[in-house]
Amino acid sequence: MYAILDIETTGGKYNEEGITEIAIYKFDGHKVVDKFISLVNPERDIQPFVVNLTGINSNMLKTAPKFYEVAKRIVEITEDCIIVAHNSSFDYRILRTEFKRLGFGFKRETLCTVELSKQLIPDQPSYSLGKLTRSLGIPVSDRHRANGDAMATVKLFKMLLAKDSDKSIVENNIKKAVTEKRLHPNHKAIIEALPAVTGIYYIHDADGKIIYIGKSNNIKHRINQHLTDKSTKSKKIQLQVASVTYEKTGSELVALLKESEEIKRNKPIHNRALRRNIFTHALYSYQDHNDYNILHIDVADGSKKPITTFTNRQSAKSFMFRVVEDFNLCQKLTGLYKTKSSCFNYTIKECNGACVEQEPAESYNTRVNQLIEKYSYDNKDMIIVDKGRDIDERSVIYIQNGVFKGLGFFDLNYQITNIEVLQTIITPMENNRDTQHIIQSYLRRNKRIKTIPL
């Protein structure tokens, strides 16, 4: 007997979500023999993106039963059943969390139709419920609502059972214990002891040696992935992990910089060697024979000083298209439009004519220099201020004459524009091409980040 279900939630932090709607179909392998569908008052806010996705808002749930009022019915309809869901680890985790809040140990075996589909219907372009059912011709109504998605999963599961002709996958491979059962008891204790915060984490073996360093915006969630994932690297970590320590940073930029430096310093066996390929392309400039400043993207070259760097060529091109519009630059002189005459933007009167020497070089170069000034911290004395570890704290990244000197934290009531004071709170760190790329990339992605010239 199977309990095929779908759950809609409030969204939010890991293990802090609440259920807004649940649908369960009891299925005997041939037909539905019982069902339970209900909205649920989660007694917490619903994330705006979830409201847009599901259409479920707080007003709809004011008179809905709270979870404790439907808990008994959920226990009864799933009794002696294998829970089936599309991405069952998510739905089952949510159910377990809700029952845990009530002090009840809810345990069932699970089947995941994502895993089953990958084995029985290989080479699909996507295994998301919507795209998979569409490609298989399974009708779906009321998408992103519990009842619609649960009924779609029932139809998908019936098809999968039919395809499993020898039944060996269902009986032997897919049916398994839930994530908690698969976890070593020590792994479970490790996860429960970690916070859902931004920072750096260190995975240690039984001798205390660091075997992996990582950064995450949710350390608890990330370690849970490491200890339940089936990748080769994760399996190796699972066999060796004895403990996990962490350092809260608050700021993703601080976490990225510390992760880069500490991997180089400690060289953990499960980290990629020194992260050598953190960036591949860069933006350079030179002056042509007509005195125009030319911008061009090229493979990163350590012997040349870039304006800024990129993880790949596509990222670099996307950046160039954006800044051409922001600074009214010429497509030809930025390498985006290869021509011997005028660029396309000139033909639609959105380029001032630098491509055909109609705009004076001095005028055009002023805007190019504005771009370089904005996206390069070469020769600059400045600090970058970001989130801190607590609400009354901020992090600071110190740049002196274009060189990254280190980072630190300061109290909101503390003045840090004084150089002597600033230098006392900074922890010195190595300046290298990786740190330059991390800082430049972060500044590009976070336009509201606060920078203060010194």
Image (cartoon, rainbow, N blue to C red):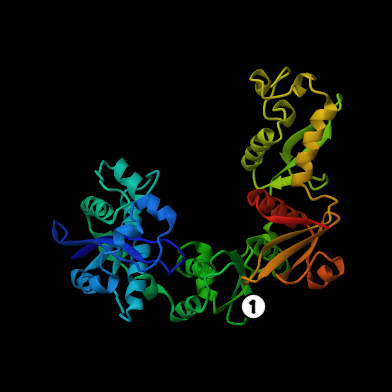
Q: Is mark 1 on a helix, strand or loop?
A: loop
At a point 36% along the width and 69% down the height, the residue shown is 43
Locate residue 345 relative to residue 375 in the image: left or right: left
Front in this rendered view, residue 291 or 298: 291
Q: In which quarter of the image is residue 228?
A: bottom left
Note whether residue 164 is visible: no
Front in this rendered view, residue 124 or 445: 445
Say above or below: 265 vs 164. below
Q: Name the residue under label 1.
A: 209
Locate residue 50 relative to residue 109 in the image: left or right: right
Looking at the picture, which amino acid does disc 1 mark?
Answer: Lys
Say above or below: 49 vs 215. above
Name the spot of residue 191 as percent of width and height, x first: 49, 75
Say above or below: 30 vs 204. above
At a point 77% along the width and 47% down the height, the residue shown is 376
Note whether residue 423 is visible: yes
Front in this rendered view, residue 49 or 106: 49
Few, some or many residues within 10 Å of mark 1 (<14, 14–19, 20+): some
